[in-house]
Every structure is written in structure tokens, then in C-alpha cells.
Image (cartoon, rainbow, N blue to C red):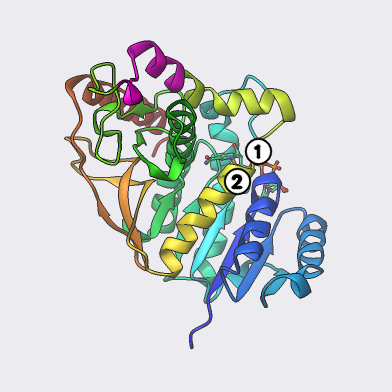
Amino acid sequence: MKTSKIVLIGSGMVGSTFAYTVLLRGLVHELVIIDANRAKAEGDALDLNHGLMLAKPMKIYAGDYPDCRGADIIVITAGAAQRPGETRTDLMSRNVAIFDSIIKQVIQHNEDGILLIATNPVDILTQVALKLSGWPKSRVIGSGTLLDSSRFRYLIAERLRVDPRSVHGFIVGEHGDSEVPVWSSLNIAGVIPDAAANQSRWNLDERAKDLIYEETRGAAYKIIERKGSTYYAIALALARICEAILRDQHSVLAVSSYLENYHGVHDVCLGVPTIVGRNGVEEVLEIPLTEKEMALFLASAEKLKQFLKQIGF
Ligand code: NAD
């Protein structure tokens, strides 16, 4: 039996929470932790190993770039964290430089794995990783708007008093301020909740929608103000993407990948519903958008393209 292996690069708040999620879920046989702060990687590996008797067998250790050999997935959460009030795009230049050094070292030791990026601004850095690695676009994935979609579904679920897993809907575009809620295809058991819903049970008026969207979009800022950074839900999102890949689940997840002619959008990585399986991105799904949603999506793409231009990608 082929054993499965994840290399985590960046064992900060997001990375170490992801590592813990991997352990709790028994997702892989081998988990390697790399961090510029070697002591932190070693400390996390020790701490996680001390739970093995209480979890599932797994080999966990602090490593270095040669340990990327044979990895199925290389998850990158290394970088500078968002400061209070700082937009994700402000982080861009600091993290592009970090990626330049990381990706060059990864590709020296691995040529057929999948890169999974979480560092912000995630769509930009997914594109930077794609270009620097030279890997096929199906094997370079960003966490995209999966976390935003999860926040969106949670807020809708709270309002309509259903399980978030029973809410089907997506946030698309940038993981950031220009993200777009796709209200037109949101549904619960096939019912589209809106002001005109024929049962009051599913009533969602424009004011409620605006509040849900604002709360979704502002979620990271709100958490950062209160506790400095966000990490539980993103760790779960990363583990969910890894699970879809390792178990070849063909799951539809709003991840970020390189788009070519998606509603006319080219040459930019953005989060949209995507079938994810053993080969990474299996198919990017062009979901219907209303005129208003389309205009917002195009504006989100344009915003990212301008940033990419500024950094020469
Ligand atoms: P953190 O500061 O706690 O951790 C970052 C880690 O990266 C540190 O341990 C640091 O030592 C390490 N690091 C820095 N440079 C490195 C290098 N060159 N090589 C290896 N390791 C290096 O930050 P965090 O809270 O874990 O956040 C990490 C990133 O994840 C940030 O960019 C943050 O904005 C992003 N994030 C993304 C999402 C999302 O939805 N995509 C959600 C939350 C956070």
C-alpha cells in the first residue's frame, strides 16, 4: 500500500492548528513540519507525537526541504500574519519574497506533488507559486473562498435554523474584500431563500442578505481584533481539501486555481466551485451568475490582475 505524506511549511497559528487537525482526523501516514523557526517545528512535532497513543498511528517529525521528496501534498502556511487593520493585499510583498525562497526549495525535491497554499493574499500567492514552480495548474491550489463559503453557510444556517452542511452556496472571487456572494444559486433542499420565497420559513430579504455578506466579508477582521489571528476554521478548510485529494473524493470546493476563460476571465487565480480529487483540480465549474454577480466577479478578477501586474506576475 502506498503511504500518504503531507509536508507542512509554516507551523504558526494556522499551520500548527492544521497539523493538529490532520492528527485528529488520521489523514495521512506521515506529516513533516518545516518552519524557519526550527525550534517551533520541533516543539510542535513533539507535542503532537505525545498525543499519538490517543489518536491514530502517524509519523510526525520536524524536517527540512529534502523531506518534501515523495510528499503527496505540500501545504504552505508560512508567512507574515495579517496585522490588526491590515488588508490582505498589504501583506503581498512581504509574502511574495518568502514564497520565492520556499517554492524554489520545494521543487528541488519534489516534482509530482500538489501545492496547497493558505498564506495571504492567497489568490495572488497561488499564482506566484504556480509561476515559480512551473507545475501544471491542476497541482497548484489555493484555499480560495472555501473558508468564506463556510462562514457564509454558517451565517445563513444560523438565520434559517438549519445545519450549515445542508446549506449549498458559494462565495466566489478573491479571498478578501472583493469576494462575491452567489445568492442566485444558494439553496437548501432545492429551495432558494429570498424575499419572494413562497414560505415565510425561507424568507431572506435584502437587508438580511446585506448583513450576512458584510459579516462574511468582515469575519477575519472581527476575529483578528479579538484574538490576533484566525486559525481553527482555516485549518479545517485545509484538512478538507487534503482529504478530497488523498481520498480522491471529487468534492466540489470553492478553492482557488488558475482560471482560463471562466466567464471570460483569464490568467488569474480565483476561488470558484471546483471538483477536487487525487489529481488536484479536476474541473473548474462555471456556475451561472446573474448580471450583478457577474459584474462583481469581473471587478474582483480585475482587482487581482492589477496587483499581479504591480508585482510583475
Ligand atoms: P504565524 O505568524 O502564526 O505563522 C507563520 C509561520 O511562518 C511562523 O511560524 C514563521 O516562523 C513561519 N515562516 C515565516 N517565514 C518562513 C519561511 N521562509 N519558511 C518557513 N517558515 C516561515 O501566522 P498565521 O496566523 O499562522 O498565518 C499564516 C498565514 O495564513 C498568513 O499569511 C495569514 O494571513 C494566512 N491565513 C490565511 C487564511 C485563508 O483563508 N487563506 C486564513 C487565515 C490565515
Q: Residue, x 35% and y 27% (percent of image)?
A: 180
Give the image location of residue 16, x and y in percent.
Answer: 69, 53
Q: Is residue 169 visible?
A: yes
| Circle 2 Cα neighbour tier, 10 Å, few/some/many (<14 / 14–19 / ≥20) | few
Which secondary structure class fits the magenta region best? helix
With 53 as the anchor, is 118 left or right in this view?
A: left
Q: Is residue 201 magenta?
A: yes
Q: Could you tell me the amino acid type at mark 2? A: Ile
| Circle 1 Cα neighbour tier, 10 Å, few/some/many (<14 / 14–19 / ≥20) | some
Checking the image for residue 111, the label placed there is none
Q: Residue, x 36% and y 25% (percent of image)?
A: 303
From which residue to which does the magenta span run?
Answer: 200-213
Q: Are marks 1 and 2 in contact (CB under 8 Å)?
A: yes
Dot 1 corresponds to which residue? 80
Q: Is residue 223 above or below residue 168?
A: above
Q: Residue, x 43% and y 58% (percent of image)?
A: 133
With 109 as the anchor, is 56 left or right in this view?
A: right
Q: Quadrant of ligand 1?
A: top right
Please tell me which residue lies in front, 245 or 209. Answer: 209
Is the CB of mark 2 within 8 Å of ligand 1?
A: yes
